[in-house]
Image: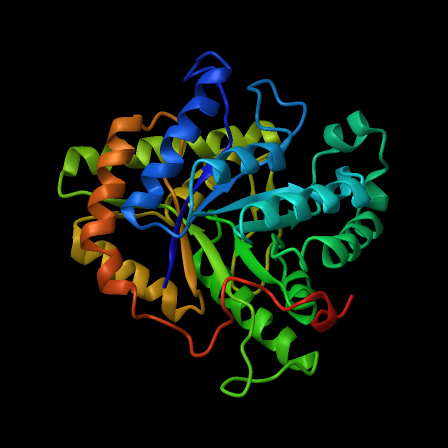
Amino acid sequence: MRFGVGLYCLQSTASTPRHPSVPYRELLEDAPSLEAWGYDGLWLSEHHFFYDGYCPALLPVAAAALAVTTRLRVGTGMMLLPLQEPARVARLAADVAARSGGRLDVGVGLGYRDVEFDGKGIRRQDRVARHRDGLVELERWAVPAGATVWNGSATSKGVARAAARGQGVLLSGANPLSLVTDLAAAHRQGWEDAGRPVPPSGARPRVSALRNVWLTDSPSERLAVLDWQRASYVLYAGLGWSVAEQGSTEAMDFRTNLDKAVAQAVDTSIVGPAEVVLDGLREVHESGVDDVVLRVIVEGAPRDAVHRMLQRFAAEVMPELAPLEHSPSSSPLMPSAAEVTP
């Protein structure tokens, strides 16, 4: 099991105001530290037309983080591909991937906010076709250059399509473990239904999941962490995020039932001493997840507290879970363009 850190959204919110340059400067300071502590990756996030300066252009930021590191992977979680011009973004991703030695993870999603499509002059009903066109361009330019393509879908059909294309998935940190389990299974099934090699004869793309994790022995810090997580999810009300009911997992709608949705999201948190965190992450692994992105860059969490926790997590938790592996998953690099079916 490998570990990343995110999501770096580079915001200046009403409750945590700061000069817009500060989160970018801190990101470039954090990236070498994460590398030194042994983390596999750093993940960014994109939105447009939100009051807090939420990062609207991920590839230039990814390039900057890659430039100050030598081993760390940097991912977009997620780039809103239908809002991009396909050939331009694919060529830029290819250039960044090539210059970084193939350390770029291009996570892509459909997008869902009307204001973003309206502001870009794009019809929301065209997003699936534009997403498909963008994937073709990424497979044409970025994958041969060493970029890895990931999908951010939250539906079984979406993750199955990603697997059929040879793409990994990065699942939302707000997803209850029941939904994570269903999506991971759908991803595996999509890979097999597409006629891909079945383990152990072939390696499938990986399933990664954002999870709300915090290692602490302090009861008061645990309560503070849950407050930070709660505050971070309140922002989703403004972004209008929701997940439809799927199987045994209830719907999660931050637009119409904020209190319930926030409580559902916060309930996914794994917070406590080492044995609690280890047990929780082993359960995540058993759900079908290969790798975890620690969702710790959240609203109100002091940067020094985040750093202390990440250093301790790297020393006490990562060595214990490193041997966990669903055998066999693919390496970080995806197949060449010739091996990927558009």
Q: Position of residue 132 (x, y in %)?
A: 79, 55
Which quadrant of the figure contains the N terminus? bottom left
Q: Position of residue 218 (x, y in %)?
A: 13, 38
Q: Would residue 243 be visible to someone looking at this image?
A: no
Q: Position of residue 57 (x, y in %)?
A: 64, 31
**Left or right: 145 in relation to 309:** right
Which quadrant of the figure contains the C terminus? bottom right
Which residue is nearer to you in this view: 109 or 221?
A: 109
Residue at (66, 64) in percent of width and height? 162
**Left or right: 314 in relation to 256:** left
Residue at (30, 44) in percent of width and height? 36
Q: Would residue 320 be visible to someone looking at this image?
A: yes
Q: Position of residue 142 (x, y in %)?
A: 69, 53
Residue at (55, 38) in percent of width and height? 62
**Left or right: 306 in relation to 257:** left
Q: How was the colour assigned to the protein in this rendering?
A: rainbow
Q: Quadrant of residue 255?
A: top right
Which residue is nearer to you in this view: 153 or 224?
A: 153
Question: Is 333 placed above or below 11 here?
Answer: below
Which residue is nearer to you in this view: 337 or 262?
A: 337
Which residue is nearer to you in this view: 329 or 98?
A: 98
**Left or right: 248 in relation to 265:** right
